[in-house]
Image: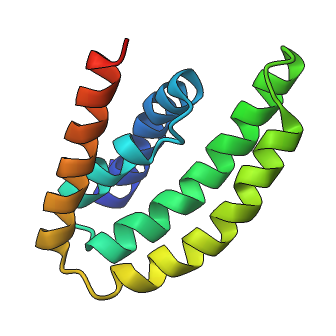
């Protein structure tokens, strides 16, 4: 198997893991996808953009699965999504001014902060 086919297989298998993690946690998968892509040598900007494409596909699938089980508040989701459209445009432009090394540190702090919050929340 040549290197290109091997990389495609690895990405598909990792995608399965990210899909399970995203659907189970509701975090969209970026918290798993970004470190994988950075490890594979992507710049921060390319990792985030590529992750969003993967997350879109994963999220649509997860939405259908959770929708079948009546686990979706469509109104709340739509309102959050509308606000997210604005935030996504601002965030993408801000990321253009951050180095990959700086992004790794910021991303790690966000994950650690989220972990502490969830762990110690009553």
Residue closest to the eye, 33 or 107: 107
Where residue 24 appears, x then y in whole percent? 54, 21
Residue closest to the eye, 99 or 80: 80
Up-down: is 92 above or below 53? Answer: below
Circle count = 0
Q: Quadrant of residue 70?
A: top right
The answer to whether residue 2 is visible is no
Q: Quadrant of residue 17?
A: top left
74 relative to 10 in the view: left or right: right
70 relative to 101 in the view: left or right: right
The answer to whether residue 24 is visible is yes
Which residue corresponds to the image point at 51% horizontal and 80% vertical from the top-left? 90
Which colour style is shown?
Answer: rainbow
59 relative to 100 in the view: left or right: right
Where residue 43 appears, x then y in whole percent? 26, 74
Which residue corresponds to the image point at 27% horizontal and 42% vertical from the top-left? 111
29 relative to 70 in the view: left or right: left
Which residue corresponds to the image point at 77% horizontal and 43% vertical from the top-left? 77
Up-down: is 63 above or below 11? Answer: above
């Amino acid at each position: 198997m040549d290197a290109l086919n091997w990389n495609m297989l690895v990405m598909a298998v990792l995608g399965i893991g990210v899909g399970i993690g995203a659907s189970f946690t509701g975090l969209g998968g970026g918290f798993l996808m970004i470190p994988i892509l950075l490890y594979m040598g992507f710049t921060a900007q390319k990792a985030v953009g590529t992750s969003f494409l993967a997350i879109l596909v994963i999220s649509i699938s997860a939405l259908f699965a959770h929708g079948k089980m009546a686990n979706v508040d469509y109104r709340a989701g739509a309102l959050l999504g509308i606000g997210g459209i604005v935030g996504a445009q601002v965030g993408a432009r801000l990321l253009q001014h951050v180095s990959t090394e700086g992004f790794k540190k910021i991303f790690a702090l966000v994950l650690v902060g989220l972990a502490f919050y969830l762990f110690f929340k009553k």
